[in-house]
Amino acid sequence: MNGIKIIRITLKSLVTIVLVAISIVISTCFSPIYDFAEPRPFSGPDIYNPYHSLDSAHCWKRANLHTHTRVEGILNECDFSADSTYHIYKSFGYDIIGFTNHNELTKHPIDKRLQMDIYEHGYNALNYHIMTYGAESVWHYDILFPLFTSQKQHLLYKLSKDADFVQINHPQRIRLFNYADLEKIGGYRLMELTSSEKEIENEFWDTALTAGHYSHGIMNDDLHYPDRPEKIAIRCSFICTPTDDYAMVRDRLLEGCFYSMSIPNYGDGDWKEKYERNKELPMVKDIGLRGNTIHIALSEPADSIKFVGSNHRTLHTAYSATSAEYTMLPADPYARIMAFYSDGAVIYSNAFVRYDSTTQESPYRGDMYNINTPLTILFNIVVALCLGVVLRLIYIIIRR
């Protein structure tokens, strides 16, 4: 066999492999096409208080609900078992740890009564990952290149049908995911917040809230490396719950009766200092609503306590304060609170939102879209044609 023939066979094999990969991606792109409702800011005579069931006797339990551990197979992203990861978190004072491996339900390593059937869905190339809570089984299908908003919405819809609720994970790290998507998609109950310096105020969450998509903001480590101090105990949520069983945690998450916190990497590599400083975090002592006035009280004075509203507009700021309040105006669709500390720690409340309590249990609106049948048919015909062309090319190459 001469060199030219070897090169031809090699090129033929490589082209075939690439085309097969493309055909697999295209075959997952079938999706409904939706007509999305226009952004509709929250309105109504009442204000939803996410902390209406707050009971200081049961506040607060520290939680991380995005934790990866060692799994079998090529999808493994962590070298530590669930058991060892659980004990590391407990040493930092955590009460609730949710194990959320990719496309796999993980058994609680200590007590089956603490089992939380949560997993992170997503194999796709764009890092579009969705957390499913209360799923009885894993939905292994994924759109491998969810380029269009309708495809992203379709995944949320399908996953939410077989779960208690779903959460959009790390939206700031999703490729080709922008503010226009956040103005349209719905059906999720939680949005994962970030502690990135560039997005420390989480403006992307305000984009969704301003458009009328109500969700609660939650912070998690998204842990993969429990042996690296800069990766663990840097983001968490504090949930007001009397117990740490899943049913109670689920209800508090859906109500919004928790707050989130971005935590500096105390000690900068000194584990002893990191452990000690994590035992002395500033806390929310009280938060709620009196009439139309939102109030918050903290255990330690913050450099600033900031109330933000629609379009990330600053509504009020208190400086060097342990408490602050803001009276919502009739024109305020919502308000949320951030407390900034000099060492870099930040506390985030959930949003207080206008709604009509006579017609709604909460401001959550669910599905704000409808299937556009003609466009759905046309889109899927185009996908099928593209798939047919690629399969035809594979056939021609193989036959040569």
Image: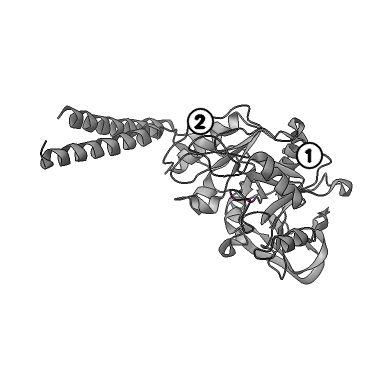
In the rendered structure, the answer to whether residue 222 lies left or right of residue 295 reads left
Q: Residue furthest bottom?
A: 320
| Residue 51 placement (x, y as % from top left) | 79, 48
| Near-viewer residue (48 or 322) | 322
Q: Which mark is residue 98?
A: none
Q: Which amino acid type is shown beneath numbered disc 2? A: His
Q: Does residue 22 appear to the left or right of 304 in the view shown?
A: left
The mark that comes first in sequence, 1 or 2, is 2
Can you say whether 239 is above or below 246 in the image?
A: below
> Which residue in the protein does label 2 denote?
140
Q: Which quarter shows the N terminus?
A: top left
What residue appears at the point 37 percent right and 36 percent down from the top-left corner? 25
Q: Nearer the viewer, residue 10 or 203?
A: 10
Residue 124 location in percent, x, y?
Answer: 45, 41
Is the residue under label 2 in contact with that under label 1 (CB below 8 Å)? no
Q: Can residue 38 be seen?
A: no
SS class, disc 2: loop
The magenta region covers 221-226
Q: Where does residue 330 sit, x and y in percent of width and height?
A: 72, 56
Identify the residue under disc 1. Answer: 244
